[in-house]
Image (tube, rainbow, N blue to C red):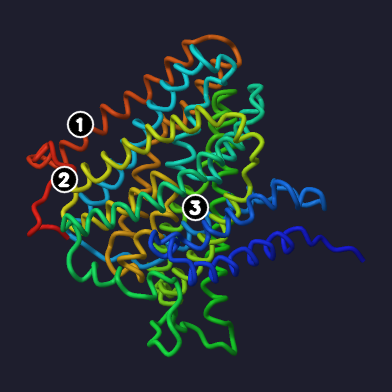
Amino acid sequence: MSFNWNFYIHAGIIAAGLVIAIFLRTRIRFFQKFLVPNSIIAGFLLLPLYNFVFPKIGFNQEYLGEIAYHLLSISFVALTLRETKKSNRANRNRQGHAVVLLSQYGVQAFVGIILTWIFIQTVKPDLFHSFGFLFPLGFALGPGQVFAIGEGWRVFGIEDAGTVGLTFAALGFIVASFGGVFLIQYGIRHKWISPEYMNKIRKTDVRTGVFPRGAKLPVGAYQTTQSEAVDSFTANTIFILLTYLLSYLLLKGIGILLAFAGPMGVELATNLWGISFIFAALVGLLVRRVMSGLKVDHILDDKTLSRISGLSVDIMVTSSIAAISLAIAFKYWLPILVITVVGTLLIITLVPWMCSRIFTNNRFLRTLIIFGAVTGTLTTGLALLRVLDPEFETPVASDYSYASGITFVAAIPFILAINFPAKAYQTGDMRWFVAGIAVAVGYIVVTLIWYMLLAKKKSFARGSKIWALDRKKNS
């Protein structure tokens, strides 16, 4: 009898890459200095193999994109099933996360579209008009989402968007890693970080990524069930898988309803699958609320859920980087490089500028998670946050998870506009292209007003400084 080994072979290859990465991180000071996550190291180790070696023996990269797509949603479900700490200022901080994220959608889309237009008018006239939209999709949404949407553009006659999107996503991971470490080190020099967090960074195990032999190990998870009935890890995992199934059924139901609205509704339903992680997060919040109401939420263990989320993060990042086609990436190297450099400079300036003024506490931690999220995914943001808050003891991660609901509702016009430049490429009607620019500008204007309402007097305090607060008030 013949069985399908496809998933397990790819999983084993990814595992091998991660094992080698763990060893390299413990031995190579460069990786330690810049706190490069093992998943990124593994991804770039596997990248040439999946491009030049494995295809010759029948293993291609397509399956890796699917792995990345699903595991991002799984990580969101695991996070939103965790208990949320109450805070009387949580509403402002959660809105603050949404404002900064949405502002980056607008800024990154505007930069990408305008630079795409410049390339079309000058050295790259055959560039597809929606090229620049892959920048915010790859940076701010992530590999699973940009791959799904990019592949969907094949109906507009665009063949390479999925791989270009993954390239932007991979570069985003690099920016998140090196840029995040730059922010941490810059924050240390300028006293943006409190002393207790500075001490955490200097620990040897943070640098090497492995606790030394004989060290006192932290508790990674607690038992919430009797193992003779069902293992505690199993209990937490099955609730995650059930929640993910419910999010799938929700999206299917929404697709059926939107179909009654005609072609525009069908198109919107297709785009919603590209951001399925948001629906997964919303369903996770609902499941947690229902379990709390039924008083059975004690079955879930926050630490176990964090471990499952971490597993999803590591495998997702590795697979998404390895899934890049180098041949297609080299074809578009110049516009990819220019858009990434210009966009990164804006991100690394605007994110700390806004975060230091809009949040009421844990400002630098919130800066890190948002910076990681708008350059990679929430998972890269969590990787940076774990440097200073390894067990997510602060409300930063949960506030971000709740903010994803606000972000989703406010991002609907952005989702509707995703295909506008692609239609311009297909039809030659530049009004679609202008409409895409208008949506990006609209997000910049609206989020600026929202930001001013939340930050109030602090909106433009010490406007010439990237970080608004003085050294005595940093946290």
Secondary structure of the residue carrying tag 3 is: helix
User: What's the distance in space between the residues labelled 1 and 3, CA to CA?
Assistant: 29 Å
Left or right of residue 269: residue 355: left
Q: Is residue 223 above or below residue 429?
A: below
Q: Which residue is mark 3?
A: 280
Q: Amino acid at mark 2?
A: Arg
Give the position of the C terminus as an image quadrant: bottom left
Q: Is residue 351 above or below residue 394?
A: above
Tag in front: 1 or 2: 2
User: What's the distance in space between the residues labelled 1 and 2, CA to CA?
Assistant: 14 Å
Q: Percent x, y for residue 265?
A: 55, 28
Q: Percent x, y for residue 389?
A: 31, 67
Left or right of residue 461: residue 180: right
User: Residue at position x 13%, y 46% from top?
Assistant: 468
Q: Amino acid at mark 1?
A: Ile
Categorize mark 1 by other alpha carbons within 10 Å: few (<14), some (14-19), many (20+): few
Q: Earlier in the sequence, mark 1 or mark 2?
A: 2
Q: Which residue is mark 1?
A: 449
Q: Earlier in the sequence, mark 1 or mark 3?
A: 3
Q: Which residue is mark 2?
A: 357
User: What's the distance in space between the residues labelled 2 and 3, CA to CA?
Assistant: 31 Å
Q: Amino acid at mark 3?
A: Ala
User: Residue at position x 51%, y 72% from top?
Assistant: 236
- Residue 432's label in the rendered image is none
Q: Percent x, y for residue 302?
A: 40, 72
Does residue 458 appear anywhere in the picture?
yes
Contact (Cβ within 8 Å) of mark 1 with mark 3:
no
User: Residue at position x 50%, y 43% from top?
Assistant: 169
Secondary structure of the residue carrying tag 1 is: helix
